[in-house]
Image (cartoon, helix red, strand yellow):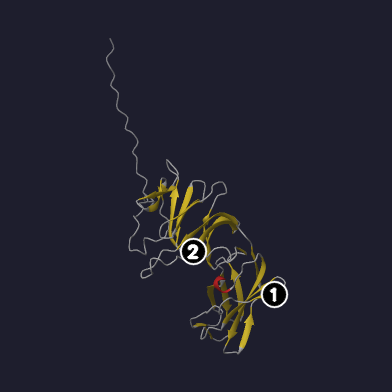
Amino acid sequence: MQVTVELEKDRFLPRETLPVRVKVVNFSGQTLVFGEDNEWLQFQVETETGEEIPPITDPPPVKGRFTVESSIRATKEIDISPYYALEQAGRYLLTAKVYIRQWGKQISTKAVKFDVSNGAVLWEQAFGLPLENGDPSGQPRQIRRYVLQQAKRLKAMSLYARVDNGPGGKVHRVMPVCSMVSFNTPKAQVDPKGNLHVLCQSGGREYTYSVIDPDGQIKVRRQYLIASDRPRLDFRDGNIVVVGGFKLTRPDDLPSKKKGGEEPEPIIVPENKPRPIPKIKPPVPVPTTNSPRR
């Protein structure tokens, strides 16, 4: 029985989404059952000095019963960021513990190290949440804040968005938005519904446009290419839109056209099938006639 814990990277921003993969490989020669309760998988986070970080809520529930046959590997993935307040910069160690009910035994993984570091703040803005149906008109609106940060992700510079209740307040989500170049500052605006619109240059001639809602969910993602002019944010008919540039179609666009029932226009690719070499007959010489001498 082998259990390992993995992270997709080793550096995170404070309270950034932290997906953890736990892999279980069964070499026991028997079928093992997991997930019959919410306590079969537990996590432990501690500082480099050995100080344990207690969860701010109940331990992450990992639901769903499944079996792992002998010589088979299974993987479970869960985001632990909502359960641990990793606000302080520093190095941390993460350990996963898997309880095997059939054996009455708990197996701990080898700890993996990761760093939490602060990114450079590029832009921030507080905004009031729009009133929901049934709320009295005179009720004060809840205040939230968008923060755009720049940090390295997988050895490349990336743009991150943070949604919180203000300095020292609750953090709703921190997530990567897109890759970015260092020579262009992202442009950001908040619309009347409280959504954040971000236009970021993600390549030499490419821009990424994203719309993020007050809960920190990316609702729209589109790619644009510099054409006769650069894409830019504009306010038209009460809406924030992208004008200029050339809109691309990518598989990671949000919302996806496939989910909405629309299929993208087919791309016509020239046929690449081998074709027979045509037989070319040599030219037939034209007979010459001798003209009479004078």
The x, y position of residue 152, in whole percent, is 60, 57
Placement of the C terminus among the 4 image quadrants: top left
State which quadrant residue 287 falls in. top left
The x, y position of residue 283, in whole percent, is 33, 33
Q: What's the residue type where badge 1 is placed?
A: Glu
Relative to the observer, which residue lies in front, 244 or 292? 244
Task: Tell me if mark 1 has few (under 14), some (14-19) or many (20+) residues whose alpha carbon lies within 10 angstroms of its own.
Answer: few
User: What residue is drawn where x is 40% and y is 50%?
Assistant: 235
Q: What's the residue type where badge 2 is placed?
A: Ile
Q: Look at mark 1 in the image and give the residue it sits on.
A: 51
User: What residue is drawn where x is 61% and y is 75%?
Assistant: 4
Task: Left or right? Give the position of 25 relative to 205.
Answer: right
- Mark 2–mark 1 Cα distance, whole angstroms, equals 34 Å
Q: Which mark is residue 143?
A: 2
Q: Residue furthest top?
A: 294
Judged from the image, the secondary structure of the residue bearing numbered disc 1 is loop
Q: Is residue 88 above or below residue 29?
A: above
Query: For the residues carrying marks 2 and 1, which lies nearer the camera in this image?
Result: 2
* Proximity of marks 2 and 1: CB atoms separated by less than 8 Å: no
The x, y position of residue 216, in whole percent, is 48, 64
Q: Residue furthest front?
A: 138
Q: Nearer the N terminus, badge 2 or badge 1?
A: 1
Q: Is residue 156 above or below residue 72?
A: above
Judged from the image, the secondary structure of the residue bearing numbered disc 2 is strand
The x, y position of residue 133, in whole percent, is 36, 69
Relative to the observer, which residue lies in front, 277 or 198? 198
In the rendered image, is residue 28 in sight?
Answer: no
User: What residue is drawn where x is 66% and y is 69%?
Assistant: 92
State which quadrant residue 169 falls in. bottom right
